[in-house]
Image (spheres, rainbow, N blue to C red):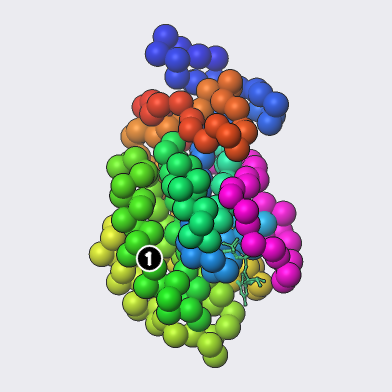
Amino acid sequence: MTDKQGIDRGQNENSEGKYDRIFKLLVVGDCDVGKTSLMLRYTTDAFTPDSVSTVGVDFKLKTIFKNGRRIKLQIWDTAGQERFRTITTAYFRGAVGIVLMYDIANEESFRALQEWSAQIKQHAAESTQVILVGNKSDIEKDRVVPTSKGSELAEQLGFLFLEASSVLNHNVSQVFEQLVDAICQQTTVTVATPSAKLTDSQPALRPAHSCSC
Ligand SMILES: Nc1nc2c(ncn2[C@@H]2O[C@H](COP(=O)(O)OP(=O)(O)OP(=O)(O)O)[C@@H](O)[C@H]2O)c(=O)[nH]1
């Protein structure tokens, strides 16, 4: 059901099935920090140790239930490689939530967060919620980024923060749940209409409308 302003108030159905809300989320960060693994662990509950480097972008869908509403998450996994940067930043537009990742055993991936946050500020909407994720918390012996450094940076940037491990399935669902909670707490979120196409050549959703979860 769509009201006069074109805002979806009821249940919609498109080729991806029924939903009340659809949120476009993006997973970004340097190469090899574990973006694909996190997305796959969350959407398929599987971990594949020999995952291949993402080329461009890819997405997976997952439906969750919140306050009796069916929320479809459209989770976009982006390539960490610099050569894909122009493509991946185009996908920031229309994202209501971003998972920004680094590897707790890779100092360079942590330093790169300054550049990633600058890209987010430049290309994403001001209302976009961001969660900083220190990944690979299972390899504590190789840790070079203390938890306190991660949480301090997140606080400074105004982002949520968690450490996670796709290997151990530690905090994986919490990453997405906390991000969705933050999105739902806002009064204005981007809502896709039933006609929104899930193609990788059409990354943008419809303009922001007021709604709550
Ligand atoms: N120990 C450990 N290894 C992980 C974890 N998550 C991913 N990895 C490994 O890290 C490597 C990179 O994982 P990917 O998920 O492909 O990383 P990515 O960020 O998607 O990489 P790009 O697509 O190249 O940007 C792979 O060898 C994974 O098996 C984790 O939580 N713990």
x, y percentage for residue 46? 73, 62
- Residue found at the far bottom of this picture: 141
Horizontal side of 3 relative to 33 (left or right) equals left
Q: Amino acid at mark 1?
A: Leu
**Range of residues picked out in magenta:** 41-67
Kindly identify the residue that appears in the image at 63 percent across and 47 percent down.
58
Q: How many marks?
A: 1
Circle 1 sits on which residue?
113
Which of the two residues, 29 or 153, is positioned nearer the viewer here? 29
Which of the two residues, 132 or 92, is positioned nearer the viewer here? 92
- Asked if residue 53 is positioned above or below residue 17 in the image, the reply reads below
x, y percentage for residue 176? 52, 53
x, y percentage for residue 144? 44, 85
Which of the two residues, 191 or 201, is positioned nearer the viewer here? 201
x, y percentage for residue 175? 51, 58
Kindly identify the residue that appears in the image at 49 percent across and 48 percent down.
88
Secondary structure under badge 1? helix
